[in-house]
Amino acid sequence: MRSAFRFLLLALLTAAAFSQNDVIAPNENLVVEGVPKIPASLAETVDRYTNFRAANFQSWDPAARQMLITTRFADTVQVHLVRAPGGARTQLTFYPDRISEAWYSPTSGTSFVFSKDIGGGEFFQLYRYDFSTGDTTLLTDGKSRNTDPVWSYAGDKLAYGSTRRTGNDVDLYVIDPANPKSDHLLTQLTGGGWNALDWSPDGRSILVSELISAQESYLWTVDANSGAKTLITPKGGAVKIAYGSGRFSKDGKGIYVTTDKDSEFQRLAYVDLNTKQHTYLSSGIPWDVDEFEISRDGKTIAFVTNEDGFGVLHLFETGSRKEKPVIGVPKGVISGVHWQANNRDVGFSLSSARSSSDAIRWT
């Protein structure tokens, strides 16, 4: 009985508006019987437990040890710049719609690209923010759904998926954000489960994922000039295999992936692009690898395992193929791991039982 009353009390607090005599007026859609008047002061006290902000790491400035984060100081999540650990944040975007992600170019801190929703419909559009002028430029068509942009290694091109052609199929587009007129369709794809993962260091190939289901996915490379695609992971096997994230190695001869091939867990693996042979790198860890990122020099991989619901950060040396210890990361859920261009700092978001999500720099 007490649990039912608490549930009804919380429903009234979140759905009601203040009345003239400082009590909560139930929403007109609620039928309330036998519930005493609830003071507005009680709602104000409860509000600090139900209305809180989170700060999510987004991207590193490639030239300075400062980062972009997203957080909410008004009604919606916007992009903010943080120049130093514990420093004041500077709000850069001001929209009624939320901004989901933001990305610096890997070679220049003069601008960044961000993804913004329109009216909650999840028809995401890509924009470029210019630091010198504060101007924002729409890069996509303003109508279709545009997702998963990835920068080329040189920082002069962006590959992304768009439903522009049919409204359903996710095709692969390429654009130079500094020149919106350069936007063009690279290759037509069938289905809605496609997304770009990475560019090869020489800029000639784009790694693309084809998601069929949570248990079945495939990896392709797409020629960045002709749009021709090549299947890396063969189809038609009796056992369905899932591939998660993927990144090119520094020499471009292979890719690092997460996959459940030959395992009940998503493991970190290296796939030779010539032989298609898989070499498993995290077999000694009996947990799923949720995500990973490679340092710009290609020497170290930061990856996160889901261990009993907690995110555990690991470092892996690609040369020696040995794991390095990670010390001092608070216990919580880790997401959005990215290396700074100095190959030392790792940025990510961390949420725990003691706080909502915070943007973290680990060195």
Image (cartoon, helix red, strand yellow):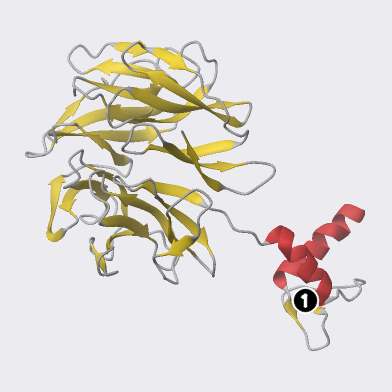
- Res 206 → quadrant: top left
Q: Residue at x 37, y 12 (%)?
A: 321
Q: Position of residue 192 (x, y in %)?
A: 32, 45
SS category of the residue bearing label 1: loop
Q: Quadrant of the N terminus?
A: bottom right
In this rendering, would 228 be left or right of 145? left
Q: Mark 1 packing: few (<14 Cα in 10 Å), some, or many (20+)?
A: many
Vertical side of 12 occupied by 65: above or below: above
Q: Residue at x 33, y 17 (%)?
A: 318
Q: Residue at x 82, y 64 (%)?
A: 9
Q: Residue at x 41, y 19 (%)?
A: 316
Looking at the picture, which amino acid does disc 1 mark? Pro
Vertical side of 195 occupied by 233: above or below: above
Q: Position of residue 106 (x, y in %)?
A: 26, 43
Q: How many marks?
A: 1
Vertical side of 145 occupied by 268: above or below: above
Q: Position of residue 207 (x, y in %)?
A: 24, 33
- Res 49 → quadrant: bottom right
In this rendering, would 295 be left or right of 313? left
Q: Position of residue 139 (x, y in %)?
A: 22, 61
Q: Residue furthest bottom?
A: 20
Front-lying residue, 228 or 288: 288
Mark 1, residue position: 26
Front-lying residue, 160 or 168: 160
Viewer can see residue 218: yes
Viewer can see residue 281: no
Q: Residue furthest left?
A: 226
